[in-house]
Amino acid sequence: MILSRLSIRAKVTLASVLLPTVLFTVLTVVWARDERRSVNEQYVDKARAVVHGAEGAREYMEDSWRSGVFDTAMMRRWSETGQLELAINAVPIVAGWRTAMANAEDGDYAFKVPKFSPRNPDNEPDETEARALRLLEKERLPEYWEIDHETNNLRFFRPIILTENCLLCHGDPGTSRQLWGTSDGTDITGARMEGWKVGEVHGAFEVLQSLDSADAAFRAGLTRMIVLAVVGLAALALLLQFTLQRILIRPLQESVMFADKLAAGDLGTRVAHAERQDEIGRLSRSLNAMAESLRTLISDMKSGSRTLKTSSGSLGTQSDKLASDSESMTDVANTVSSAGEELSSSIAGIASSAEDMSNMLNTVAASIEEMTASITEVAKNSVRSADIADNANRQSKSTVEIMGQLKAASEKIGRVLEVISDIADQTNLLALNATIEAASAGDAGKGFAVVANEVKELARQTTQATEEINREIDDMRQRTTAAVTAVENISRVIGEVNEISTSIAGAVEEQSATLNEIAKSGGVANQAAQEISRRVNEGAKGTQEIARTIQAVREGVHETDKGIQATRRNAAELAELSDRMDELVSRFAL
């Protein structure tokens, strides 16, 4: 919960503000309700007074009718002489409401006489008035009032109960001739008589009073109350805060600080307020007693820790001495064992190396035989390659000579083509001259001109063919020159290959002789390695016997060392326990 995370100071502050605020709110609501009820009662009392005034005027007029001041004959004379208004003013109910209406403006209220089926349309009831009239008639209520929230008016209703005087105009229509001298059931005003009875309710006096001024006064009073309450609440909250700070919050804070010091190891402090007899005093005394108990306990732990540390140190010294002696014996046994193991390892290594050497020599011999066969084959192939290269060299030289001859022939063809080209040019020139001469001869030279043109065309075609052949010859010359260059390069490379093949053949012969010598030496070395391996195996047997003896000594020393190590561990554990106790105790300040 949120409250559980708040400090006591925050909770007290919240309570000192919240509780008076709630109390003020409740009191304000009660005051507002009572104030509203009081205002309503005042307005209802005022409405009653207005209605009582109207009822008084009505009763006064009825007494006048009963005493004979007014009668129906007088009213008929007023009506016949055109003084109908005097007759209407003499009606008791009319006198009552007109009296109330006369004082309405000065009394700050409105007065109405709502009724069902009124003779005056202004008295037609609205929804609220109709509901009130039905309620008054059904429940036979002496009065009824309600607040109209739409108009903010208090509406007061007093039922109009019919009397004998009311029946003069609203009674039995059959009495109209006797009372008013009419045969159609109407009264003096010409309205038909309704046939109502004494005691019935068909209308009411209504007083309407606006509550605007009362609401304004209520809001002003509420505002004053809120201002005074806020000031009072603030003063009360400050007073509560100050008082609670001194008698509750500050002692609790000091107790919390004391507990924090205890948690940090400070056992030399004391909490105040132990002299108080309330819960704060009991808490302070309990905290001081707890601190004293902790101080005694820590002192005892310190003393026990020192004793334990002394005992563990003595035990550790004795175990260290035994461990040192055991380690010396172990070192001697390990030295002897290591020497034996090293000797055995060395002998085994020598035997293994001798055996490996023998195997390697056998492998080398086999490899030399394979290498000799390969070198012999290489020598044969080298001689064959030299012969092939020499033959290729000779053929390339022959090819170069043929290419040279082909180049010379193409040059000769070129010179012949030049001669043909010159002849074609001359022929073309002669044909041109013949054409000119034929043209000079006129008709006699036409045949000769035709021949000359044919010769000219033939000379032109010859020139074109010669040029085409010349281009092909030039291309052939270029290709021949390139081929000669390539063949010369090939001939040079073949010569180099021939020289290399000859050198390889000579080197192979020398390597073959060397490998034969190596093979002979390898056989001798193989025999020596086998002899070494045999002698080393004999020495290894003696070394293994020594190693078994040393191992028995080591096992005895190892068992002794186990007991010593267990003692040392126990001593170390005691020392560690003592150190931990010292560390824990050192956290507390006595």
Image: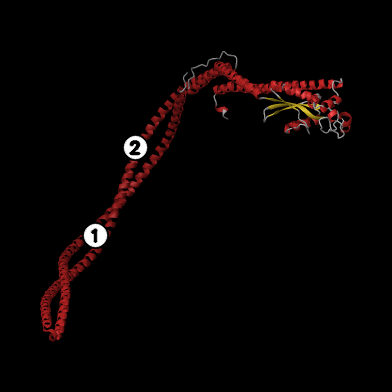
Residue displayed at 40% across by 40% down? 555
Image: 494 above or below 120? below
Tell me if label 1 and label 2 are in contact, CB under 8 Å: no
* Residue 533 on image: x %, y %: 29, 53
Q: Nearer the viewer, residue 307 or 51?
A: 51
Q: Earlier in the sequence, mark 1 or mark 2?
A: 2
How would you rate the neighbour count of disc 1 (Cα within 10 Å): few for under 14, some for 14-19, many for 20 or more? some
Q: Quadrant of residue 137?
A: top right
Which is more foreground, mark 1 or mark 2? 1
Kindly identify the amino acid type of the residue bearing the numbered disc 1.
Answer: Gly
SS of the residue under disc 2: helix
Kindly identify the amino acid type of the residue bearing the numbered disc 2.
Answer: Val
Q: Tell me how far mark 1 sits from mark 2, CA to CA.
A: 46 Å
Q: Nearer the viewer, residue 330 or 388?
A: 388
Image: 182 above or below 285? below
Judge left or right: residue 117 versus residue 353.
right
Name the residue tied to disc 2. 332
Q: Quadrant of residue 480?
A: bottom left
Residue displayed at 31% across by 45% down? 343
Name the residue tied to disc 1. 523
Question: In this figure, what is the number of numbered marks?
Answer: 2
Q: Look at the image and tell me in which quarter the N terminus lies.
A: top right
